[in-house]
Image (cartoon, rainbow, N blue to C red):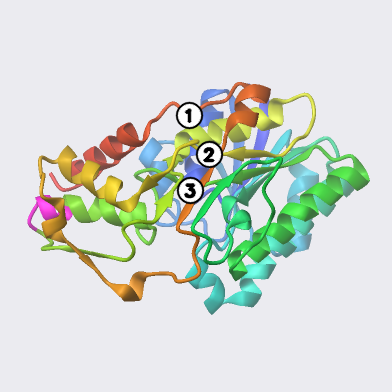
Amino acid sequence: MADKIALISGIAGQDGAYLADFLLRKNYRVIGLCRRATREALWRLDHFGIQNQVEILECDVRDYPRVEDILKKTQPHEYYNLAALSSVTGVWERPLEAFQTNCDAVVNMLESARRYSGETRIFQASSGKIYEQEKLETLRVTEDQSEFKPIDLYSVTKLAAHFSVINFREQYGLFAVNGILFQHESPLRPDTFVFKKIIKGVADLKKGNKKYLELGNLNVSRDWGFAGDYVRAMWMMLQAKKPEDFIISSGEQHTLRELLKVAFEALGIKDWEAYVRVNSDFIRKRDTSELGASNERIAVSLGWKPEYSFLSLIERMIAYEMEQRA
């Protein structure tokens, strides 16, 4: 018999699949919410071989009565809200849907929990982009010194959700927390994100399926970690004695140049620059050039630290892509 019940919205995504696998190993009953409960939509669960172990409920998180009904019936010990419209470009194309999914749905969740499932502990996937500042060269985020200054619509929606969690926590005493997630990768990452784009591109080049990679500013640096490490941090935050928000990051920064060098060298290619072309159309002119974050506070408070290094993450993802092409 399961020890606890966990509800995961966004179960079909990268983090949802890693979290479901993690919780099942801890003997949780895992219930996943997604808009379309098809095998194609839930392929990431098949990656872990757990699709038949997760209870799937079709639910649009913007549907307040549906969310309310699910919380009433399931009374989960823990609720992880990972659902979001997460593409910066996609948010600008669908701004109303972005606010409804990334912000309104969070208030739906909090209000439903307050009214019908008050003991449920809630994790909200916040974003490191809420700190990003327009045209700033370098930003090293620390929780006690850095300001929120979102520069795009996606970041605005995430910041609104972030403050909603804080307000419900302080007003009603909910155990609700924000995990401020910096960029995290895995073989299950969507291909639209630059880290995965590079990994897949290098594998295609090695196999002769591509002649070159086309990228933007190679000097941009980011804080990249492994998704499997980050879902462990999510769980640890809900096991704490008191609800607190934490930055979840690798604590390191690396440039796209470093990523390219390591990825190509993992496949025995030294002259990586011969296979890369810079396209100015891919350069985001408003982005912070160097963005990273300290994970010292969560390390001290909860004892969390990432197990995967930048190098081991790249090697794992390269190995996966090469297996897919074998």
Q: Main secondary structure of the magenta part?
A: helix
User: Which residue type carries mark 1?
Assistant: Pro
Q: Which residues are magenta?
A: 204-208
Q: What residue is pinned by disc 2?
A: 249
Which mark is on residue 183? Answer: 3
User: Which residue type carries mark 2?
Assistant: Ser
> Considering the numbered disc 3 on the image, is that residue within a helix, a strand or a loop?
loop
Q: What residue is pinned by disc 1?
A: 306
Quadrant in which the N terminus is drawn = top right
Q: Is residue 282 above or below residue 180?
A: below
Decide whether residue 212 is among the magenta residues.
Answer: no
Q: Residue 232 at x, y = what percent?
A: 55, 30
Between residues 295 and 83, which one lies in front from this camera angle? 295
Quadrant of residue 120 in the image?
top right
- Residue at 85% across, 51% down: 167
The earlier-in-sequence mark between 1 and 3 is 3
Give the alpha-carbon distance from disc 1 to disc 3, as whole Å. Answer: 13 Å
The earlier-in-sequence mark between 1 and 2 is 2
